[in-house]
Image: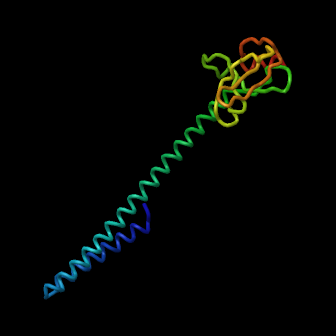
Amino acid sequence: MDLVAIQAAISSLKAAADISKSIMDMKSMSEVQGKVIELQSALLEAQNCALMATTSQFELQEKIRELEAKLNEKGNWVKEKARYQLVSPWRGPAQTYALKQSEANGEEPHLVCSSCFNKEAKEILNPLKNKDGWVQMVCPRCKSTMDTGYKGIGGPKYAEEYAKES
């Protein structure tokens, strides 16, 4: 809660209590009515301060929820990222991420887009032949392409298998 709003609410309530005590000592009705107006004003101020403090608390709780969700997403990505290894599946400089067999948990081998992966997104690459018949790996998300240097390639392998070949 907003400490300033709480202090203001307490101050307004103290003023209201003081006004209430002074009403008892009043002799004329006009004095009483004046003090009643002061009392109502002090109570209204206390209510406004309490509302501001509640609003501030709600905003802070919402921010905490958002930050916890982001932290959870980051933790999930760290775990997911550890399941992959950067490999060079074909001759040349082309690199991509391959699923580690030790982390597969029954999942089939696949290659993911390194560009998307570096942006904390996992997108499986799809083979596609270009107009000359050469196989390219294409990312459906960012549309990046990777030349394989082959007219035909087998299915993807686990990262450990690519490491044995190099």
Judged left or right of residue 17, residue 69 is right
Quadrant assignment, res 37: bottom left
Specify the color scheme.
rainbow
The residue depicted at 34 percent of the width and 66 percent of the height is: 48
The residue depicted at 77 percent of the width and 25 percent of the height is: 146
In the image, residue 155 sits, relative to residue 140, either above or below, namely above
The residue depicted at 66 percent of the width and 27 percent of the height is: 83
Q: Quadrant of the N terminus?
A: bottom left
Rendered location of residue 39, percent (x, y): 25, 76
Judged left or right of residue 96, residue 140 is left
Q: Quadrant of the C terminus?
A: top right
- Front-most of residues 2 and 131: 131
Rendered location of residue 161, percent (x, y): 76, 16
In the image, residue 11 sits, relative to residue 74, either above or below, namely below
Rendered location of residue 128, percent (x, y): 72, 17
In the image as oriented, which residue stretches furthest toward the front? 131
Quadrant assignment, res 155: top right
The residue depicted at 69 percent of the width and 26 percent of the height is: 139
Judged left or right of residue 75, residue 51 is left
Rendered location of residue 16, percent (x, y): 27, 75
In the image, residue 83 sits, relative to residue 4, either above or below, namely above
- Front-most of residues 98 and 145: 145
In the image, residue 76 sits, relative to residue 139, either above or below, namely below
Quadrant assignment, res 21: bottom left
In the image as oriented, which residue stretches furthest toward the bottom? 27
Q: How many callouts does the rendering have?
A: 0
